[in-house]
Image (cartoon, rainbow, N blue to C red):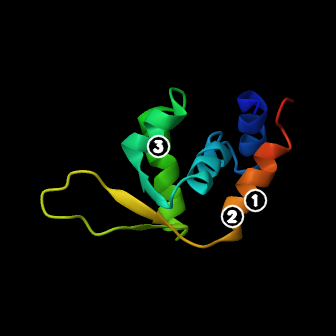
Amino acid sequence: MNLDAVRELSRALFGGAQYRIEVGCAIADGDGLVCIKDLADKLGDPPGTGSVNAELKVLERAQLLMRVPREKGERRVYLARQESAYWAFCQEMASRWKGA
């Protein structure tokens, strides 16, 4: 996947949110549970932890992700992916730019 092209598309579609499609694809490809640190580690830098955190907050506000109750003593915040065509949309948009 050509990340520069995907990021440009994301900026165009989401008003400057250059990592939204990239983050969406990573979430769509995962097991349904998302942790900020794990996702940031998977995606690298950029986007980095700060940008991943910002994107996850947007997706949570849109109810595409829901917080999972923490176990006692657990420090990490986990979010559960909710059923939505949004995830397939991210994958479709990114796949158009493979090798671009």
Amino acid type at mark 1: Phe
Where residue 72 sits: x, y (%)?
13, 63
* Quadrant in which the C terminus appears: top right
Q: CA distance from mark 1 to mark 2?
A: 5 Å
Residue found at the far front of this picture: 31
Query: Callout 2: few (<14), some (14-19), or many (20+) C-alpha neighbours within 10 Å?
Result: some
Amino acid type at mark 3: Leu
Total numbered circles: 3
The residue drawn where x is 79% and y is 32% is: 5
Amino acid type at mark 2: Tyr
Q: Which residue is mark 2?
A: 86
1 and 2 marks in contact (CB < 8 Å): yes
Q: Which residue is mark 3?
A: 39
Q: Which residue is mark 1?
A: 89
Q: CA distance from mark 2 to mark 3?
A: 18 Å
Q: Is residue 10 above or below residue 48?
A: below
The residue drawn where x is 83% and y is 38% is: 97
